[in-house]
Image (spheres, rainbow, N blue to C red):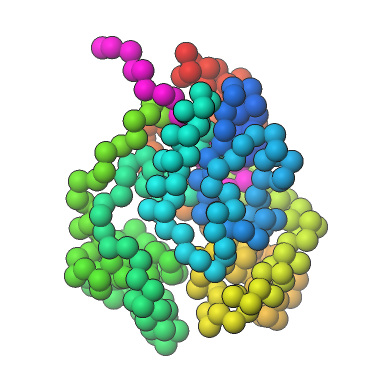
Amino acid sequence: MGIDRRPPVIALMGPTASGKTAFALDCAQRLGGEIVSVDSALVYRGLDIGAAKPTAQERARVPHHLVDVREPWLPYSAADFAAEARAALDGIVARGRLPILAGGTGLYFRALLQGLSAMPSADEGVRAALVDEARERGWAALHAELARVDPEAAGRIHATDAQRIQRALEVYRLSGRSISEWRAEPQAPRLPYRVFKLVLAPHDRAVLHGRIAARFDAMLAEGFLAEVGALRALPQLRDHPAPLDLPALRAVGYRQAWEHLDGSTDALGFRERAIAATRQLAKRQFTWLRGELDARWFDPATDQRDLERAVADFLG
């Protein structure tokens, strides 16, 4: 078998609060790399503290891509990400540097590394109609509708996952075909790169839960609620008929903060709800990561030497 001469790419995956940002920065500085964010919250301007966005100082140390590329009232799809990330990878390789994909949004990784089928693109009219129906009937009722037209998708999507229920029903209503049928079709050619998938995750789930709580408390101390207050004051969000249905405000923590500022919870209840939502996000991310059968897993706290050796071996 000949040597694989395709340019190398490191794909750094993991659940929220697992230490991906710190390792990506260190790796990029040591190896002459640039970071491509694979995070559905970091694409939005104004989502900084609550999204654990790399600081201005960190971005000055290492070039970052696909951070702050959309206003929070605008949509950003997996197809948008795949196209822009591919362009970023091509540019990084052309400059003779190492691309490092870093984040925890599984759909974005899948869209970039495996390609997307040519299913219908977003339709604002259909989406608005689904949101109106959800207000009247509830997302559980729409999930039941999805189970009738696409049992496979309904089995994958939780009854409270409004964004994915909406997308699956949108595709069905636009095309008359289920999203599962579309995904079963041949996909676009994969990237012309040699990709090394790494998963950073503590061996002990309790350690991750502790990190999630500590990080959220740090976000509160940094002014997370003031950040959400500034978002609420933006005319495009203040005047939006259903701001919490926007993809940006579905980011974990932001919905809970918005509702808290509406007076629905006290400070303790807000903290508990936000931490619980973040733990649920981590659980979903673990489910996705276990499906990445070609990825290698490391605990950044205990496996640092093995992790660095694995990267060095991959790069030759």
| Residue 82 rendering spot, x and y as whole percentages | 40, 47
Q: Nearer the viewer, residue 302 or 138?
A: 138
- Residue 270 figure quarter: bottom right
Side (left or right) of 289 relative to 69: left
- Residue 207 figure quarter: top right
| Residue 113 rendering spot, x and y as whole percentages | 37, 39
Whether 106 is among the magenta residues is: no
Q: Residue shown at 69%/75% (left/top)? A: 233
- Residue 203 figure quarter: top right
Q: Residue shown at 40%/79% (left/top)? A: 128
Total label count? Answer: 0
Q: Is residue 212 visible?
A: no
Side (left or right) of 2 relative to 107: left
Q: Which residues are magenta?
A: 1-18
* Residue 6 against residue 90 in the figure, above or below: above
Q: Nearer the viewer, residue 255 or 273?
A: 255
| Residue 46 rendering spot, x and y as whole percentages | 65, 61
* Residue 200 against residue 131 in the figure, above or below: above
Side (left or right) of 134 relative to 155: right
Q: Residue shown at 21%/68% (left/top)? A: 175
Q: Is residue 84 visible?
A: yes
Whether 7 is among the magenta residues is: yes
| Residue 124 rendering spot, x and y as whole percentages | 39, 74
